């Protein structure tokens, strides 16, 4: 008599338990897609990320081509960041007052037109530095209006309990596009020039408008009418409460000194690693692969309790990766480092995005997110600072300094965010 028969137990066949576990992981990974309308938001994110990847890849390479200067590459990033920084807070208040879906469609329409105009200027060889700076400034304004509205829609669609999963899936979409778009964009620049990149960005923005037209949202209660300036100031006052303020401080340091390494990738590719536009595409895509792997892991974990620690861990790891990127003169080693940097950056992004949404009240969510996206403007302003610093100590030295500051600031702020963002025990919204 077998042991199973002896004990009267029907044991699962070999391999069934692992299959059940794998199915459970798959359900956790894709749980946000069970929310009606989330698919269209995910596709919109895919389109937005595709356009952003193509535009960013072209921006740095175009300015480097026109000026042969790391400083002007930094200036381009600074203009974009300043526009985003100045407009994000009022844009957050706007997102709390209007139809967010319509607002997103308007931003993508403006972005499509801007990319088309710049593409024509490049193809006709009429482009000047001021054209590029005008475009990136407009892009900064568009991003400032786009992001709080898109983020508020995500919370409306999926609720709090699925928010981390939904956020990770959105960052996963961005990573997929970053991988494919960066490699394709590098080859397009190398073979056809920069103009076709911006034509593609214009088409993708139009695709985002289409995906949003298919999103059906229930009517949302509007806040009581109040003067716009008063609404902006109320959002700022709310964001200075301790539970939100520390998150904003962390975001400023991480964006300014951690994420700004993106700005210098074109310079590292051409002047330090000597790999040209194709190598630039590979460096950018490997960062996307790191982001993809990390977001898949975060999404498949389901509910994460220690979101504050996860957030700081990602920020600390990003700072270390940027420092190592500045140290590396080898292309293959640099590919591995930017992969790690991508993984750490997306871990941090998914965590802080979720923590901020859960810390904000429904009526203040757009304004809190607007301030958060204003701090993301320091990413581009930090790129300007890194570009200026690079003229004094070289690009590798500037990256090492920035990475060190990001890592130290994340470690210093750990005690103030420990335990923050623990998910509520109540059911979903």
Image (tube, grey):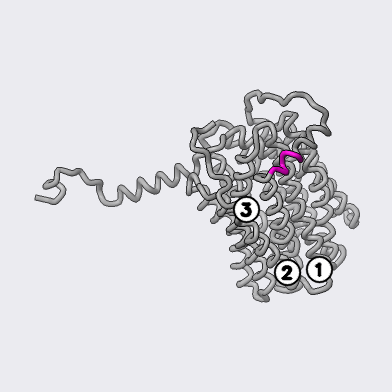
Q: Is residue 97 above or below residue 135?
A: above
Q: Are marks 3 and 2 in contact (CB under 8 Å)?
A: no
Disc 2 element: helix
The one nearer the camera, 358 or 110, is: 358
Q: Residue at x 73, y 34 (%)?
A: 95
Q: Residues within 10 Å of mark 2 (few under 14, many from 20)?
A: some
Q: Position of residue 259 (x, y in %)?
A: 70, 58
Residue 254 appears anywhere in the view: yes
Q: Position of residue 150 (x, y in %)?
A: 68, 38
Disc 1 element: helix
Residue 288 appears anywhere in the view: no
**Gap in Å between the C-alphas at discs 3 and 1?**
30 Å
Q: Which residues are magenta?
A: 236-241
- The quadrant of the image that shows the C terminus is top right
**Gap in Å between the C-alphas at discs 3 and 2?**
24 Å
Q: Position of residue 269 (x, y in %)?
A: 72, 68
Q: Main secondary structure of the magenta part?
A: helix
Q: Nearer the viewer, mark 3 or mark 1?
A: 3
Residue indicated by mark 2: 401
Residue indicated by mark 3: 416
Q: Looking at the image, tell me whether mark 3 or mark 1 is earlier in sequence order.
A: 1
Disc 3 element: helix
Q: Are marks 1 and 2 in contact (CB under 8 Å)?
A: yes
Residue indicated by mark 1: 389
Q: Nearer the viewer, mark 3 or mark 2?
A: 3
Q: Is residue 111 above or below residue 197?
A: above
Residue with the most extreme bottom position: 329
Q: Is residue 221 above or below residue 17?
A: above
Query: Residue 415 in magenta?
Result: no
């Amino acid at each position: 008599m077998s042991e199973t028969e002896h004990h009267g137990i029907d044991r699962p066949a070999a391999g069934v338990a692992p299959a059940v576990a794998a199915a459970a992981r798959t359900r956790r990974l894709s749980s946000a897609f069970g929310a009606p309308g989330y698919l269209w938001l995910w596709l919109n994110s895919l389109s937005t990320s595709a356009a952003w990847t193509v535009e960013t890849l072209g921006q740095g390479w175009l300015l480097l081509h026109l000026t042969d200067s790391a400083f002007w590459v930094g200036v381009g990033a600074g203009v974009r960041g300043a526009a985003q920084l100045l407009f994000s807070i009022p844009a957050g208040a706007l997102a709390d007052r209007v139809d967010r879906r319509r607002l997103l469609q308007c931003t993508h329409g403006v972005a499509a037109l801007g990319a088309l105009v710049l593409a024509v200027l490049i193809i006709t060889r009429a482009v000047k530095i001021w054209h590029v700076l005008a475009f990136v400034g407009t892009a900064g304004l568009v991003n400032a209006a786009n992001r709080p509205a898109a983020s508020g829609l995500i919370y409306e669609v999926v609720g709090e309990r699925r928010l981390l999963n939904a956020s990770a899936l959105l960052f996963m979409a961005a990573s997929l596009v970053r991988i494919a778009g960066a490699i394709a964009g590098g080859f397009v620049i190398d073979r056809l020039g920069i103009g076709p990149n911006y034509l593609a960005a214009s088409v993708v923005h139009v695709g985002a408008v289409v995906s949003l037209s298919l999103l059906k949202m229930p009517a949302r209660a509007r806040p009581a009418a109040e003067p716009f300036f008063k609404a902006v100031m109320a959002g700022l006052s709310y964001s200075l409460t301790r539970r939100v303020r520390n998150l904003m401080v962390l975001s400023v340091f991480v964006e300014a000194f951690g994420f700004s390494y993106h700005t210098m990738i074109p310079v590292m590719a051409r002047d330090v690693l000597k790999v040209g536009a194709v190598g630039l595409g590979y460096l950018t895509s490997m960062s996307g692969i790191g982001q993809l792997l990390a977001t898949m892991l975060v999404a498949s974990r389901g509910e994460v309790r220690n979101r504050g620690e996860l957030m700081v861990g990602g920020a600390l790891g990003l700072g270390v990766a940027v420092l190592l990127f500045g140290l590396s003169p080898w292309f293959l080693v640099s590919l591995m480092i930017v992969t790690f940097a991508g993984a750490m950056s997306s871990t941090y992004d998914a965590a802080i995005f979720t923590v901020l949404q859960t810390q904000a009240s429904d009526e203040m969510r757009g304004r809190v997110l607007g301030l958060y996206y204003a701090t993301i403007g320091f990413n581009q302003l930090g790129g300007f600072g890194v570009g200026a610093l690079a003229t004094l100590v070289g690009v590798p030295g500037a990256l090492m300094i920035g990475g060190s500051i990001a890592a130290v600031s994340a470690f210093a702020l750990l005690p103030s965010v420990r335990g923050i963002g623990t998910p509520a025990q109540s059911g979903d919204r």
